[in-house]
Amino acid sequence: MNPQAIKVACSNCNLRELCMPMGLSEHDLNRLDDLVAVRRKVKRGTTLFTNGEKFTSLYAIRTGFFKTCLATEDGRDQVTGFQMAGEIIGLDGIVNDQHTCDAVALEDAEVCVMPFDRIEEISREVTALQSHVHKIMSREIVREHGVMLLLGSMRAEERLAAFLLNLVQRLHARGFSQSELVLRMTREEIGSYLGLKLETVSRTFSKFVEEGMVEVKQRHVRIVDTEGLQRLVNNNACH
């Protein structure tokens, strides 16, 4: 791979604002361009890394959508998260130098491979990068707390409402519509993530449709009443 191809990676990437620290000098940006070793294509349904695999890199998702999951003792897949373009995946490996989950592409995807030893090396020079990595890790912890809260105290409607609002908000930050989204994951995967049975997810979607809060055509979802969904979630927060 020629050096110029790598050069293009960060400085000209339209996801830079989401993925990299803001407001860097030209020199720092050039240093960051040394971060990305290669870009890797991941076919739909294949894994980027697996549970127990040695941790070497973080991955910035350029295109596509992933789920992270764990096999439970009874052989089921427990979905632990969904990740989209502009997000960093692989942080689970930092603690014990090995990954603790599988990352599976839900559609054809492309990731930038950022070797972790290189991130640490460049962090010593570009302190903004270090605090950026800490921010990403902190965001991950906050997200996990949010999921715990979701699973701990919310009814099915509240869980699904919170999930849809979170998803559309993350997509909106990437320049997509504030109200329309295509679900890259199945109803079953949503259920696994939210701790709900498949039929509960389907029933709750139907209820939202009946109440005029969303319109659903297969995987296309249009949020008609954002406030209504927000009220559902906030009511829980007040209890």
Image: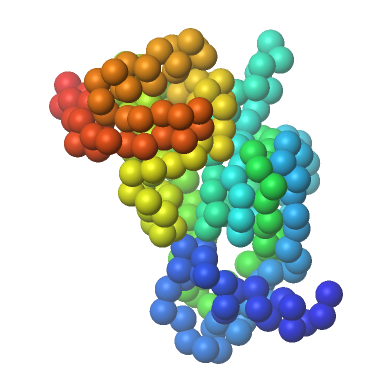
Q: Which residue appears at 52% of the width and 89% of the height?
A: 26
Residue 155 placement, left or right of 231: right
Total numbered labels: 0
Could you say which quadrant of the image residue 72 lies in? top right
Residue 108 placement, left or right of 144: right
Q: Position of residue 89 (x, y in %)?
A: 60, 49
Front one among 194 and 117: 194
Q: Which residue appears at 18% of the width and 25% of the height?
A: 235
Q: Which residue appears at 61% of the width and 50% of the height?
A: 64
Q: Which residue appears at 57% of the width and 27% of the height?
A: 186
- Is 212 rendered above or below residue 222? above
Could you say which quadrant of the image residue 173 lies in? bottom left
- Is 199 rendered above or below residue 194? above
* Colour convention of the picture: rainbow
- Is 126 rendered above or below residue 167? below
Q: Position of residue 168 (x, y in %)?
A: 38, 44
Residue 54 placement, left or right of 30: right
Q: Position of residue 56 (x, y in %)?
A: 74, 55
Front one among 197 and 32: 197
Name the outermost residue toward the front: 217
Front one among 36 and 159: 159
Q: Position of residue 126 (x, y in %)?
A: 53, 78
User: In which quadrant of the rendered image does the N terminus lie?
Assistant: bottom right
User: In which quadrant of the rendered image does the C terminus lie?
Assistant: top left
Name the outermost residue toward the right: 1
Q: Is residue 106 visible?
A: yes
Q: Is residue 91 visible?
A: no
Front one among 78 and 129: 78
- Is 213 rendered above or below residue 37? above
